[in-house]
Amino acid sequence: MRVRTLLAAALLTVTAATAASAYRFFFADRLAEQLEQQVGTSVFVVDELVRVWSYQDVDGYVRFDTRRFRCAVPASATESIAYLREVQRRREQGDTTPPLLALFGKLARPPLWGPVLAGQEDGVASEQIVLVCDRIEKPRKRFFLEGH
């Protein structure tokens, strides 16, 4: 029985480490410079919340903007949305804490900001690159102290 418990704990540790390493870390300014080349990459980045769209016209997603990226998070990610709304509320109330978000997701070209227009050789120029978040968390303390 004890061996099974140890094996289960080891498996959970390996699974958690694999899931954490599935995202490639970028500093926000560097990722913004390489955005086009990183489409399709799962990334982890910390950036400042600018706004949560008041008009959410896309079913199944909550759209928001950070200082450098257009973002969306599935409406089913309730914990992520709760943290996003908390940061938005603090920002609107004049809180001086930087409105930082730790964003985990994939860079993609979903049609969340309008229709996709096809027919260009190097991809579709009308598509915007969006960080489609799997989750949003509070960044570690060092991001608030050292910048992002």
Image: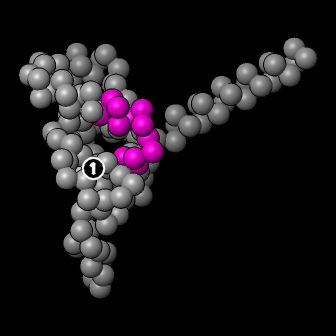
Residue 37 among magenta residues? no
Residue 144 horizontal/vertical position (percent)? 24, 19
Which residue corresponds to the image point at 18% horizontal and 47% vertical from the top-left? 54
Quarter of image, res 119: bottom left
Q: Residues within 10 Å of mark 1 (few under 14, many from 20)?
A: many
Which residue corresponds to the image point at 80% horizontal and 24% vertical from the top-left? 7
Q: In screen coordinates, is 116 left or right of 135? A: left
Q: Is residue 37 visible?
A: no
Residue 64 horizontal/vertical position (percent)? 24, 46
Residue 122 horizontal/vertical position (percent)? 30, 76
On screen, 88 above or below 98?
below
Residue 25 horizontal/vertical position (percent)? 39, 37
Which residue corresponds to the image point at 73% horizontal and 29% vertical from the top-left? 11
- Quarter holding the N terminus? top right
Q: In screen coordinates, is 19 left or right of 107? A: right
Quarter of image, res 100: top left
- For badge 1, the amino acid type reads Arg
Extreme residue toward the right, this view: 1
- Report the magenta residues as a range: 73-84
Which residue corresponds to the image point at 29% horizontal and 74% vertical from the top-left? 116
Extreme residue toward the bottom, this view: 119
Location of mark 1 (residue): 63
